[in-house]
Amino acid sequence: MIECDDKLRRLLQSKEGTLYIALSGGIDSLTLMTVAARVRVHPTIAMHAVSAAVPVEATERCRSLAVQFGWELQEINALEFESEQYVSNPHNRCYYCKSSLFTAINACKNVAGTGTIATGTNIDDLGDFRPGLKAAAEQQVWQPYVEAGVNKDTIRQIASDENLGTLAQLPAAPCLSSRVETGITINPNDLQLIHQVERLITQLTTPGDIRCRIMKRGVVVQLPTDSRILSDKEFCLHAQSMVEDLCVAAGKTFIGFEEYKKGSAFIKPEAVIRAGV
C-alpha cells in the first residue's frame, strides 16, 4: 500500500462524528466514499445532488454502488438553478454551484446534528482555477485527499485496489454546465442537448474525453485524438448527420468536430490570465 493511501485511510478512520461525502458520481468521490465506508466506524453518508447539470449516468452510478456496498445515500436538490449568479454563467460559476451544494448539505447536517462535509478534491486540482475551492473553504469543507497528498493517478490505483473495476479508468466528467461557454446563460434544455450528443458520440467512438460544447459560434463536439470520427471521413459524415439532427431539434447550429481541448468553453478573466492559472 502506498504511503499516501495509508495516510488517507488513517485520516478517514480517525475523523469523529458523521461524515457527509459530496458524491458527484465521478471516480474521485466514488473512491473516497468506498474507502470511507470500509474503514470508518462512525456514520458515513453519501450526499448526491440530482440536477439538470448532472448526467443521469452519474446518478445511476451512485445508486448502483450504494446498493452494492450498502451505503446510506441521500439525494438532494442543491437549488443552484435558483441562483441568478450561477445561471448567468460568469467565470466563477463553480463558486455559486458549490456554495449551493454545500449549503444544501449543511442543511441536512444541521437537522441531524454535528458532522463534517468532505469532497473528492485531490492535489492535482489545486493547480487549476477552481472557484469552488473558495466555497469549500468558506463552509469549512474537508478535503481528505489533499491532506493525505493523494493525486488523480493514486485515486485510480486505490479504486482498482477497492475492486471498483472499470470505474477506475472512468474519464473525468465535470458537470454539464462546464460545456457552456462563459457568459452564455445556463439553460436546462441546452444541458439536455449536451447530454444527448455526448451519449450518442460515446456509443460511436473511442472512449475518453468527449465534450459537446455550446459556444457563441455554435455547437462543437470535441473528441479524443484517436477517435475514428476524426480520421474516417465517411464515418465522420455519418456522425455529423446524427448530431446535426439533435442540434436542429434543439434550435442550435452544429459547427463540427475537433480534438479535445481541456477547458475550452471557459473564458478566463484578465486577472486569472496574468496569474498564469
Image (cartoon, rainbow, N blue to C red):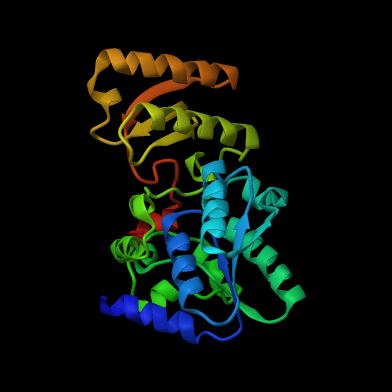
Query: Where the N terminus falls, by quadrant?
Result: bottom left
For image coordinates 57% across by 49% down, the residue present is 59
Quarter holding the C terminus is: bottom left
Instruction: Identify whether 252 is placed above or below 32.
Output: above
Which of 239/165 is in front?
165
Q: Is residue 211 above or below residue 87?
A: above
Image quarter for residue 100?
A: bottom right
In the rendered structure, the answer to whether residue 201 lies left or right of residue 33 reads left
Outermost residue on the right side: it is: 111
* Residue in view at x 48 percent, y 40 percent: 179
Give the residue displayed 50% in from the left and 61% down from the top: 131
The foreground one among 190 and 90 is 190
Front-lying residue, 89 or 150: 150
Residue 111: image x %, image y %?
Answer: 77, 74
Image-quadrant location for residue 28? bottom left
Compare residues 234 and 215 and report the one nearer the observer.
Answer: 234
**Residue depicted at x 47% and y 17%:** 244
| Left or right: residue 273 compared with residue 94 | left
The reply to whether residue 193 is visible in this rendering is: yes
The spot of residue 211 in percent (x, y) is 41, 37
